[in-house]
Image (cartoon, rainbow, N blue to C red):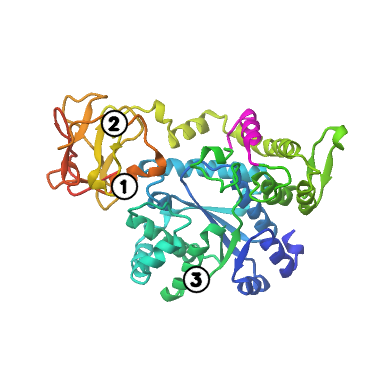
Amino acid sequence: MADQLSPDEKFDLITRNLQEVLGEEKLKQVLQERELRVYWGTATTGKPHVAYFVPMSKIADFLKAGCEVTILFADLHAYLDNMKAPWELLELRVKYYEQVIKAMLESIGVPLEKLKFVKGTDYQLSREYTLDVYRLSSMVTEHDAKKAGAEVVKQVEHPLLSGLLYPGLQALDEEYLKVDAQFGGVDQRKIFTLAEKYLPSLGYAKRSHLMNPMVPGLTGAKMSSSEEESKIDLLDSKEDVKKKLKKAFCEPGNIQNNGVLSFVKYVLFPLRGEFCVKRDPKWGGDKVYTVFEEVEKDFAEESIHPGDLKASVEAALNQLLEPIRKKFESPELRKLTNSAYPDPSKTSHHAAMCLHVSIWNVLDTLTTCLLAFYFWNSSSLFFCSEGDPRRVEPLDPPEGSSPGERVFVEGYETGKPDDRLNPKKKIWEKLQVDLKISDECVAQWKDKHLMTKLGQITCKTLKGGNIS
């Protein structure tokens, strides 16, 4: 198909349904001379969900336009972003992402042999790349780095240096993947403009940037892996899909922040070229639409009932998900899923210290906080590490300790912990910055020892390390 398209037709296909394009003239110039090289990257953090069909449908457009497409599994980025993916799970997360992304592409008919798949740490740990990170860090201000990652990197009160490095690494990826353009969501715009500003300072070419709009989730806000109510997982059963769509925000006549309508626009129409609304004959019967604007118009005029729209999207979505579900029924992929995303309620660590944090009387400063820690059976395994993230050790409770035994901060021996923490208060983020390993290899919070009734919590060798 690409051989039959003119450069202008390729440009229209590449840019359709995008919210913004930076560097249009450069794109057109490249298309006059050769096929465009573009990459899309995804940090291997939480499980991909149905909103990932939006970039997948654009990747299908890129291939139809003859583009050379690279998919980057950004494992190092997943770790740098406040350790959303623990170091010990990075390899498993990459394997899971590769399998599920390939299954998504196959479900929409994209030929995998035309794609190139790359893992970030295959080149991001090289001498040349590392030197460029240092060169870039000598040019980028803290203000620019923080601003660039504001909508992508997890925002906390005490940001880690790793989060400030994230945007610069994403900029360098454009050079090391040898592409003409990077494709991503519009939430990455500030990272893209940082790349345009600083790559020429390193002697590298300024690339073009292609941006998808952010598709609303089921609640009307951005669909997020970390917000269960906002998303439909790729492996959700038909029953789960029905239940989640039933709760989805889809107010009669309201076309703003409507995740159900957005899915029709950005996934179903690009892939199929039409959309069928299934209705009872007494309400007009089934109607096939070939232009999205007509669907939007009829919904705005309340000619389409939200229940009929949801039911029709449910049927189309299950057709896309069924091949993915079947692929992941294999014992190997089930095992991979469980290993990459272990169930916290079924994970037990008897040999390492796990911390359950509680705070009373959280006031304006952390100096007024009291803490209680527990040596607990959970998935919250705590490690100490040095500057090299590959060097980690579990924290060791005193000999003779057993699960359920109380751990406390020296000087804060009394008090009763809360039953659960409110994640919106970001209590852990506030406390973690002051958890360290002393020069004597003792775990500390603000220079006070972590203790049990049997003695101090320690690690074996990592003096001055961090606890995470």
What is the quadrant of the C terminus in the image?
top left
Q: Earlier in the sequence, mark 3 or mark 2?
A: 3
Residue position marked by numbered label 2 in the rendering: 417
Magenta span of residues: 234-249
Which of the marked residues, 3 or 1, is nearer the chain's N terminus? 3
Residue 132 visible to an observer of this rendering? no
Q: Which mark is residue 196?
A: 3
**Residue 65 to residue 294: above or below:** below
**Foreground of the two, 6 or 297:** 297
Q: Quadrant of the N terminus?
A: bottom right
- Residue 202 vs 398, above or below: the answer is below
| Mark 2 crowdedness (10 Å alpha carbons): few <14, some 14-19, many ≥20 | some
- The residue sitting at 61% across, 73% down in the picture is 26
Q: Which residue is mark 1?
A: 430
| Dominant secondary structure of the residues highlighted in magenta in the image | helix
Check disc 3 and give the amino acid type.
Glu
Earlier along the polypeptide chain: callout 1 or callout 2?
2
Task: Evaluate if marks 3 and 1 touch, with contact meaning CB atoms under 8 Å apart.
Answer: no
Query: Residue 22 in magenta?
Result: no
Distance from Cα at disc 3 to Cα at disc 2: 49 Å
User: How many C-alpha atoms fall within 10 Å of the one at disc 3: few (<14), some, or many (≥20)?
Assistant: many
**Neighbour class for label 1 at 10 Å: few (<14), some, many (≥20)?**
some
* Foreground residue among 442 and 38: 442
What's the amino acid at mark 1? Lys
Give the image location of residue 280, x and y in percent: 83, 32
Provide the secondary structure element on which disc 3 rests. Answer: helix
